[in-house]
Image: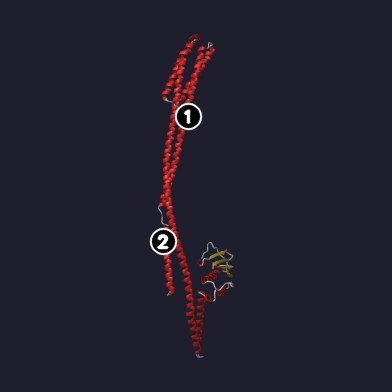
Amino acid sequence: MVVGRRSATLAQGMTNLVSSAKRVSERTGRPNGSRWLLLAGFGGMALLMALAGIYAIAAIRQVQENDVNIYGGFLQRNIALERIRWSIVLSAVYARDYLVDPDPQNAADHLQNLLKTKAEIDVALQYLHGAVPEAERALRISISEYWNGLLPVFDWTPLERRQYGYEFLARRLLPQRARLLSVADTVGALNGQQLEAGRVQSEQLFADFTRRMFWLLGATLGLALFLGLWTSRSILSLEQNLARRYQEIQVAQENLEALSKRLVDAQEEERRNISRELHDEVGQTLSALLVELGNVAAEVPAEQQVLAARLQSAKTLGESSVNAVRNMSLLLRPSMLDDFGLVPALHWQAREMSRRTGMNVTVDAEDLPDTLPDEHKTCIYRLVQEALNNAAKHSAATSVKIRVEEQPERLRVKIEDNGKGFDTSTTRGMGLVGMEERVRHLKGILRVDSIVGQGTNIAVELPL
């Protein structure tokens, strides 16, 4: 009844521990909608940065194109005006030479150069598009009046050129040229004003770009600041939750280890009680029964051969039962482990395993003291017992060597067999798990080295 109540209590403790672990797991694995807000925030910030980059590229390209158009147009018109000024000055020189040169052939050459100059001015006028329309129109009118004033002299005879040439130069050609150059200067000044207006326009475009980029940068930084603060708060909260969960898991693990230790202790206590009851109660009862059977057999008359045979058969069955109870008691918890110590118990276990399986089991543990704690003796005995069972059932070993030695502040146990071995990365039975649990309860270290076809080595270190 005591054993049953203890098992029920341990089972209830295991159920409570599993329920607590489930609650911790459910709280830890609960979905958090804030991750979507975080993703949306970082996505929005990345989108704003991408939009800012695209807008910056477009705005810079627009400013660059505007500058190219403004300065390109200014240079083109300025070159055209310079060509017009130079052509006008040159045309006046050709016209003077034409009027004053008495040689007809030279005069014809001067006239031809004058016509070429007029053609060059007409070509240059085509590159003035984009200038101030009123100024361009005034310049074209002045150039047309200038050439119209020169047209009559083209039909003059040499005598007329000598008579009226100097007067024409002084009164008409030179004043018209001066007026034309003045109009060209006005157009040049207006062209410079256009350049200044373009520069102001470019500055305005750049200012608008700077202002919009400032707002975009402000929005991005604001969103980044919000995300940073919110993320920091979430991380701190998550850190606190994780610390709390870690503490809960640690407490649950400690409770699990304590419960496992209680289970192992309860199992050993139950084995000790059952072994003692089998040995003391059942064994003594069977022994008394055998004595009574012997007494009855002694009083049976010689002629009652049938009854004597039946009594002998019952006595044989009783002796077999006594041996079976004795073996069961020793397997559960050998009394010599408590009465004589660990070393005799290990030697007895080795002899029994050799007798039952035929394996050659050797034990080297002669230097162990008799003052070992009960927990250490029980742990080593069960480790050796489990290792021998595994060697006999699974490894097909023919030889097992057991060595137990005491070193400064620790015990070392080494078990070697020549069996077929196994893959430690894939094979993990309940026997090994139980061995690890026993060693872990004593803060020890268990190492299992095995290679397929080359046997198994088990090394254990237990602190004292």
Q: Which residue is mark 1?
A: 72
Do residues under tags 2 and 1 come within 8 Å of each other at their CB atoms?
Answer: no
Q: Using residue 37 as the reference point, say whether residue 346 is left or right of it.
A: right
Q: CA distance from mark 2 to mark 1?
A: 76 Å
SS assignment at label 1: helix
Residue 55 picture location, percent across and down: 44, 39
Q: Quadrant of residue 197?
A: top left
Image height of 412 relative to 280, above or below: above
Q: Quadrant of residue 363?
A: bottom right
- Tag of residue 97: none
Disc 1 packing (10 Å; few <14; some 14–19; many ≥20): few
Residue 140 picture location, percent across and down: 44, 21
Residue pictured at 45% horizontal, 34% vertical: 63
Q: Which residue is mark 2?
A: 23
Residue 233 picture location, percent across and down: 42, 52
Residue pictured at 43% horizontal, 65% vertical: 17
Q: Amino acid at mark 2?
A: Arg
Q: Quadrant of residue 103?
A: top right
* Depth check, front residue: 361 or 203: 203
Q: Amino acid at mark 1?
A: Gly
Rendered-image quadrant of the C terminus: bottom right
Residue pictured at 45% horizontal, 63% vertical: 251
Q: Using residue 445 as the reference point, say whether residue 13 is left or right of it.
A: left
* Depth check, front residue: 377 or 153: 377
Image height of 298 relative to 108, above or below: below
Residue 183 picture location, percent across and down: 44, 21
- For the question of whether residue 12 can be seen, the reply is yes
Image height of 228 relative to 339, above or below: above
